[in-house]
Each structure stands twice: as C-alpha cells, then as structure tokens.
Amino acid sequence: MRWVTISVVGIGGSLRAGSQSERALGVVLAGAAEAGAKTTALVGAELVLPFYDPGVGERTGAALRLVEALRGADGVVLVSPGYHGTVSGLVKNALDYVEDLREDERVYLDGRAVGCVATAAGWQAAVNTLSALRSITHALRAWPTPLGVAVNTLQTRFGEDGECSDPSVPDALRLIGRQVVEFAANRAATDG
Ligand SMILES: Cc1cc2nc3c(=O)[nH]c(=O)nc-3n(C[C@H](O)[C@H](O)[C@H](O)COP(=O)(O)O)c2cc1C
C-alpha cells in the first residue's frame, strides 16, 4: 500500500465572534488530524468573496486560495450555520466557487468524501441545513460521510478551545473527521 499524506480542507463558520460553526469545524478537523491528515481551515472572514459570477474570470487572492485548497484536497469538511432554515449565504457563495473546478480532470469534488455539519438555534434549521449540505455534496459529485451532525446551539455550546457542554457532540464531530480521512486513504490505496 502506498503511504500518502491525506489533505483535508474545512470550509465554514460565520463572521460572528465566537462562531459556533467555526468551533465545530475545528473539532472535525482535529478528528481528521488525529487520523493522520494535514488539515486546512478556511473560515469566517477568509470566505468573504465577491458574489460568484460565472462571467468574470478574475479572482481575488482569497478566492484563489479557496479554489486551490479545494483542488488539492483529498477530503473536505463543510460546516454552516442555519440561516433562515438553510445554508448561510457566506458558505453557499464560497461553495459556488467550486464551479472553477468544472474543467478539472477531477471535476468539482469528484471522488472525495465530504463531512457535513450544521449548527442552528433549533432542530428544524439544524437538520434542514445538514440535509442541504449533503445535497450540495452530491451535486458536486462527492460522497457525504455516513455520519453528519446537526448541532442545536440552544442546547450545546462550544467554548474557545472547542470544549463542549455535551461531550457526545465532539465525539461525533471527530468521528466525521476520521471518516473523511478513512475514505480518502482507501481511495489513495485503490488508485495506488
Ligand atoms: C441571519 C440569521 C438567520 C438565522 N436563522 C435561523 C433559523 O432559521 N433557525 C435557527 O434555528 N437558527 C437561526 N439562526 C441562528 C443560528 O443558526 C445559530 O445561532 C448558529 O449557531 C449560529 O452559528 P455561528 O455561531 O457560527 O454564527 C440564524 C442566525 C442568523 C444570524
């Protein structure tokens, strides 16, 4: 078996100080790192990009960084807050830039595992946002991990270092990170 370093890129969070979705993303990436991956997080202000315009070829530095990170990723983690019942505009606009991978040999996120997590101040938006992220993953020709997590932030809070009021939640988030890495490692071994 060929030994490769798996690269996992996490995208998400919000512009809010103390963003719960950003903290949740950090826990998923910690799980990926424990499984041996090199991780990169693009969060909050790093996702402030011009509205994606298919007719405009120029890219800002931040947009190029996002696209190149995703192009080189073996696995991806998406974490969005639920805004009015679904994925926030910040996260969705960032994901629209995956369109720049349309002409790649490995089109969009083809063949990659994507771990999805949603946070919201209630179950309805949390679950629907998780479901939306998993649908977007399918549209991008990728594989949602078996486990996804919806976090109700009225009941569960993350502290500054990712510590959580409900220890079962970080356990589940780290498992998502491991699932992303396991899938990527299996693909790498098969493609060998
Ligand atoms: C513009 C906006 C819309 C929101 N809409 C919903 C919603 O429809 N349902 C819900 O449960 N929470 C909603 N929330 C609450 C957030 O989803 C929740 O506080 C989330 O944990 C915020 O994530 P963050 O800490 O990463 O910013 C909304 C918050 C904002 C700012």
Image: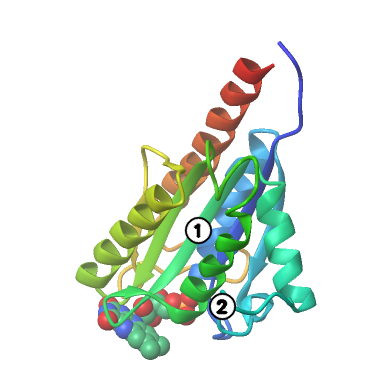
What is the tally of numbered marks visible in this picture?
Answer: 2
Q: In the shown orientation, is residue 85 left or right of residue 32?
A: left
Image spot of residue 128 (x, y percent):
25, 65
Give me the residue at 60% from left, 16% from top. Answer: 190
Q: Indicate the secondary structure of the residue bearing disc 1.
A: strand
Q: What is the quadrant of residue 186 in the picture?
A: top right
* Quadrant position of the C terminus in the picture: top right
Q: Residue 162: in sight, yes or no? A: no
Task: Point out the residue furthest to the top here.
Answer: 1
Q: Which residue is mark 1?
A: 78
Image spot of residue 167 (x, y percent):
43, 52
Going by the numbered disc 2, the residue's amino acid type is Tyr
Going by the numbered disc 1, the residue's amino acid type is Leu
Q: Which residue is mark 2?
A: 52
Cα–Cα span, label 1 and label 2: 18 Å
Give me the residue at 41% from left, 73% from top. Answer: 81
Q: In the shown orientation, is residue 179 left or right of residue 149?
A: right
Residue 156 against residue 9 in the figure, above or below: below
Classify the position of ligand 1 by quadrant: top left, top right, bottom left or bottom right: bottom left
Image spot of residue 92 (x, y percent):
46, 72
Task: Point out the residue furthest to the front here.
Answer: 55
What crowding class fits label 2: few (fewer than 14 Cα within 10 Å), some (14-19), or many (20 or more)?
A: some
